[in-house]
């Protein structure tokens, strides 16, 4: 299982140092939580773009961009210049299946891996048809928009069910979970057949990034 470190709680004053230290500590991805103040209450659009831009200039660690926004296309265009590895958008932000397919294809056409995310209360039946079309499914294990929440165990059941479908259909689709991942919950996350776990405070607030990441892995 790979670790994608959420930089949502990184302080601006020492951000560059933190990013460098996370790279040397062995994070597999930098998780960029883009919020527009509409899809979720918090607005991180400027801060996250600044952070992502800084990381692109100082690090080779891939960017894992998570768009918690009402208008995914607008934000996708903004991030394409930073050549992220993955761009994830929310199922709940789209008005139709046609729009979802259009966004997936647009991300692919620009050389980026597309991913789709669902909130804890969204039924997995809504996204099953898109499994063959995306690189990854991101299952939110907390309500999107706030850091430091406790993991919702029922949401992990969704990851398990998605994993079974991926296996039965012999797909190469990855599963990522985001929310409440720490050393107490990581074992349960692993048992849900998760490929990438997003961790924020469990790493950022640790005294030693390398030890925190190593413990999670």
Image (cartoon, rainbow, N blue to C red):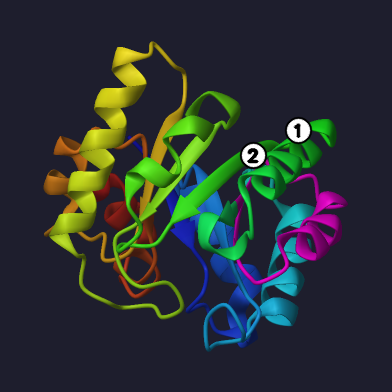
Q: Position of residue 145 (x, y in %)?
A: 46, 78
Who is closer to the viewer here, 186 or 103? 103
Who is closer to the viewer here, 131 or 187? 131
The answer to whether residue 128 is left or right of residue 75 is: left
- Residue depicted at x 36% and y 42%: 125
Q: Position of residue 182 (x, y in %)?
A: 22, 61
Quarter the N terminus occupies: top left
Is 5 situated above or below 217? below
Is 97 situated above or below 5? above
Task: Reply yes or no: does residue 90 show up in magenta.
Answer: no
Quarter-of-image position of residue 73: bottom right
Q: How many marks?
A: 2
Label 2 neighbour load within 10 Å: few <14, some 14-19, many 20+? many
Work out whether residue 118 can be spotted: yes
Label 1 with label 2: CB-CB less than 8 Å: yes
Q: Position of residue 37 (x, y in %)?
A: 62, 86
- Residue depicted at x 80% and y 40%: 106
Q: Position of residue 130 (x, y in %)?
A: 53, 34
Q: Secondary structure at mark 1?
A: helix
Q: Which residue is mark 2?
A: 114
Task: Write down the region rendered in magenta.
Answer: 65-88
Q: Which residue is mark 1?
A: 108
The CA distance from mark 1 to mark 2 is 6 Å
């Amino acid at each position: 299982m790979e670790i994608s470190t959420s930089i949502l709680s990184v302080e601006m004053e020492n951000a560059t140092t933190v990013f460098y230290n996370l790279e040397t500590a062995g994070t597999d991805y930098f998780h960029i939580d883009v919020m527009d103040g509409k899809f979720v209450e918090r607005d991180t659009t400027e801060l996250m773009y600044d952070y992502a831009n800084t990381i692109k200039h100082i690090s080779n660690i891939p960017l894992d961009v998570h768009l918690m926004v009402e208008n995914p296309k607008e934000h996708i265009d903004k991030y394409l210049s930073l050549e992220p590895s993955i761009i994830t958008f929310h199922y709940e932000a789209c008005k139709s299946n046609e729009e979802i397919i259009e966004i997936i294809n647009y991300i692919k056409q620009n050389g980026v891996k597309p991913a789709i995310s669902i909130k804890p209360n969204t039924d997995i039946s809504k996204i099953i048809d898109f499994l063959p079309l995306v690189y990854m499914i991101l299952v939110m294990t907390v309500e999107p928009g706030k850091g430091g929440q406790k993991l919702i165990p029922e949401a992990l059941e969704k990851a398990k069910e998605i994993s079974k479908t991926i296996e039965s259909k012999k797909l190469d689709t990855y599963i990522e979970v985001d929310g409440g991942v720490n050393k107490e919950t990581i074992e349960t996350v692993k048992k849900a057949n998760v490929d990438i776990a997003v961790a924020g405070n469990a790493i950022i607030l640790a005294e030693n990034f390398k030890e925190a990441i190593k413990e999670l892995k």
